[in-house]
Image (cartoon, grey):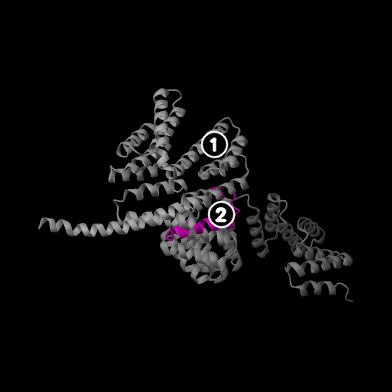
């Protein structure tokens, strides 16, 4: 009975082994094709088959170290990760000589030479006739000599000679495998040589020489990713940003869109070349494809599409961000803004309200409330709701001047001049050097026929900003229509058109002042100039200008 109980599950295990061995066979075949042709299709097949092998049979040790070797050679994992994978293979089957050999190989790459030698010796003990392990151990001894600054070199040199000679003799029976492994090791040593030389010139501040060394090595090394990264750092130091981007883009391509490399490229662009909107979109799209539920990618994509004025794409991106993080107030705010751009104001209002309910930050929420107030006032014509929203915004922020001004503007628009004046003055309490507020306050006083105060505040606006063409024009109107002083008014209008030659209304008012002074020819020229400009600027009804022009010469 005991034999039957142990025999039945053994058949099931054998079936699993058969399936995993078939998958492993496919992986090895694709791996070999990739080494010969270097096609991404073979690379992907090999990786997927190795992973599938491990899933089908976690005890299949060769899949671990073969997968580690493939991923490391292509820059997809670091040395430490490769060491961990090979260590796992050794733990699973301590009798696997190849597992010890590959672990020793990666330990040597990590400059852990003593541990590497121990693993190589275990591999040789398990499989004495192997040539590959002996040759790699010989090269490790030589590499240790190079890095030991003359310490214990005799012992390592003796070991290198012994294992090199015996490995060479045994290689007569293993030509194909030694050729492949030696080529990989030679590439590693070649890379280390260029890397060390480049680092030396970097340390002595000879970046150009270092860059040239790295550049000459990238076509000859399978580890070009690290070299391109160093070249990018040098280019950044020299403010050669286009070169830096090309290097980092090569890193992304060579790493087969490794997420960390893509993130590095994004961070570089956002810091140094944020105008490369299309490239940023490409990188964020890569991340979104790899991590479909990473909402931040869609959020950033939305803003990039807005930057390109691609409103529909922006809307879609923000919707995807909210799909994976539906209660995020920042995403709600951005989607609301996209709706505003598409003039879908009701949808925008609902999202702004949801964002405000969360209130992640008072200052931020104050800005959102102002955006919502603008829709209520400018789009919905609901000044009461707009003012209420702005009053709430005042409670959330220390920067009140802008909100006081917005409330004053609404009161001015609905012709509640006393409240408008009150809030313009409140705005000036916090922002006393703002010429726009003085100008708006002057306009409110002008509407109330308070001519002296209008003159005072327009003059203050001009004092703060001598190039404020609107203030000059409006002050001219006060003198022309309020005081009947056409001569003084003309001086202000002339200054306005000198500052802004395309200012239609200032040309029109200058014509009116000349007309009042009885200078009909000059007035006619100014009216004509205003009419010509207005055909492009459309500041006034053409008929208004034409009527004044025709009446000049009526009997």
Judge whether residue 426 can be spotted in this image.
no
Q: Position of residue 522 (x, y in %)?
A: 87, 64
Does the segment drawn in magenta span residue 274?
yes
To which residue does mark 2 refer? 401
Mark 2 nearby-residue class (10 Å; few <14, some 14–19, many ≥20) = many
Q: Secondary structure at mark 1?
A: helix
Q: In the rendered image of this protein, does residue 344 appear above or below residue 425?
A: below
* Identity of the residue drawn at 30% across and 36% down: 125
Does the segment drawn in magenta span residue 505?
no
SS assignment for the magenta stretch, majority: helix
* Identity of the residue drawn at 52% across and 37% down: 190
Q: Which quadrant: the C terminus? A: bottom right
Q: Position of residue 263 (x, y in %)?
A: 49, 50
Q: Position of residue 501 (x, y in %)?
A: 78, 59
Q: Position of residue 9 (x, y in %)?
A: 19, 58
Residue extending furthest toward the left: 1
The magenta segment is 268-294
To which residue does mark 1 refer? 194
How far is the residue under mark 1 from the one under mark 2? 61 Å
Judge whether residue 144 can be spotted in this image.
yes
* Identity of the residue drawn at 63% across and 52% down: 434
């Amino acid at each position: 009975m005991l034999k039957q109980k142990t025999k039945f599950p053994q058949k099931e295990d054998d079936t699993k082994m058969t399936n995993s061995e078939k998958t492993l066979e496919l992986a090895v075949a694709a791996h070999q094709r990739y080494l010969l042709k270097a096609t991404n299709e073979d690379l992907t097949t090999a990786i997927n088959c190795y992973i599938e092998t491990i899933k089908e049979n976690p005890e299949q040790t060769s899949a671990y170290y073969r997968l580690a070797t493939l991923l490391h050679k292509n820059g997809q994992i670091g040395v430490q990760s490769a060491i961990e994978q090979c260590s796992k293979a050794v733990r699973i089957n301590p009798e696997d000589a190849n597992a010890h050999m590959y672990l020793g190989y990666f330990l040597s790459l990590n400059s852990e030479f003593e541990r590497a030698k121990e693993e190589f010796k275990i591999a040789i003990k398990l499989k004495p006739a192997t040539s590959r392990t002996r040759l790699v151990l010989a090269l490790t001894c030589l590499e240790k000599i190079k890095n030991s600054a003359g310490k214990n070199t005799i012992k390592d040199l003796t070991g290198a000679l012994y294992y090199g000679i015996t490995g060479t003799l045994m290689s007569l029976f293993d030509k194909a495998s030694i050729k492949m492994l030696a080529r990989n090791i030679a590439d590693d040593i070649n890379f280390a040589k260029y890397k060390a030389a480049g680092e030396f010139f970097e340390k002595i501040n000879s970046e150009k020489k270092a860059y040239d060394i790295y550049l000459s090595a990238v076509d000859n090394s399978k580890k070009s990713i690290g070299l391109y990264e160093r070249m990018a750092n040098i280019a950044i130091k020299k403010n050669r940003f286009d070169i830096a981007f090309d290097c980092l883009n090569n890193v992304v391509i060579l790493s087969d869109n490794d997420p960390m490399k893509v993130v590095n490229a994004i961070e570089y662009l956002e810091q140094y070349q944020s105008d490369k909107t299309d490239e940023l979109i490409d990188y964020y799209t890569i991340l979104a494809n790899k991590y479909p539920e990473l909402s931040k990618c869609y959020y950033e994509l939305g803003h990039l599409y807005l930057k390109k004025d691609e409103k529909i794409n922006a809307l879609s991106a923000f919707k995807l961000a909210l799909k994976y993080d539906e209660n995020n107030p920042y995403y709600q705010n951005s989607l609301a803004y996209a709706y505003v751009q598409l003039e879908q104001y009701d949808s925008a209002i609902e999202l702004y309200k949801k964002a405000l309910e969360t209130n992640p930050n008072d200052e931020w929420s104050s800005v959102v409330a102002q955006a919502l107030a603008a829709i209520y006032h400018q789009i919905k014509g609901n000044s009461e709701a707009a003012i209420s929203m702005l009053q709430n915004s005042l409670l959330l922020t220390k920067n009140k001047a802008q909100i006081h001004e917005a409330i004053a503007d609404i009161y001015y628009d609905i012709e509640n001049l006393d409240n408008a004046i009150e809030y313009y003055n409140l705005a000036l309490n916090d922002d006393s050097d703002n010429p726009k507020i003085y100008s708006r306050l002057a306009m409110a006083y002008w509407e109330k026929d308070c001519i002296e105060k209008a003159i005072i505040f327009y003059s203050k606006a001009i004092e703060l900003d001598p190039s404020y063409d609107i203030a000059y024009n409006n002050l001219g109107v006060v003198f022309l229509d309020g005081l009947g002083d056409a001569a003084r008014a003309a001086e202000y209008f002339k200054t306005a058109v000198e500052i802004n030659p395309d200012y239609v209304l200032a040309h029109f008012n200058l014509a009116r002042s000349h007309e009042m002074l009885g200078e009909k020819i000059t007035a006619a020229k100014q009216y004509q100039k205003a009419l010509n400009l207005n055909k492009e600027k459309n500041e006034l009804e053409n008929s208004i200008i034409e009527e004044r022009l025709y009446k000049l010469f009526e009997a």
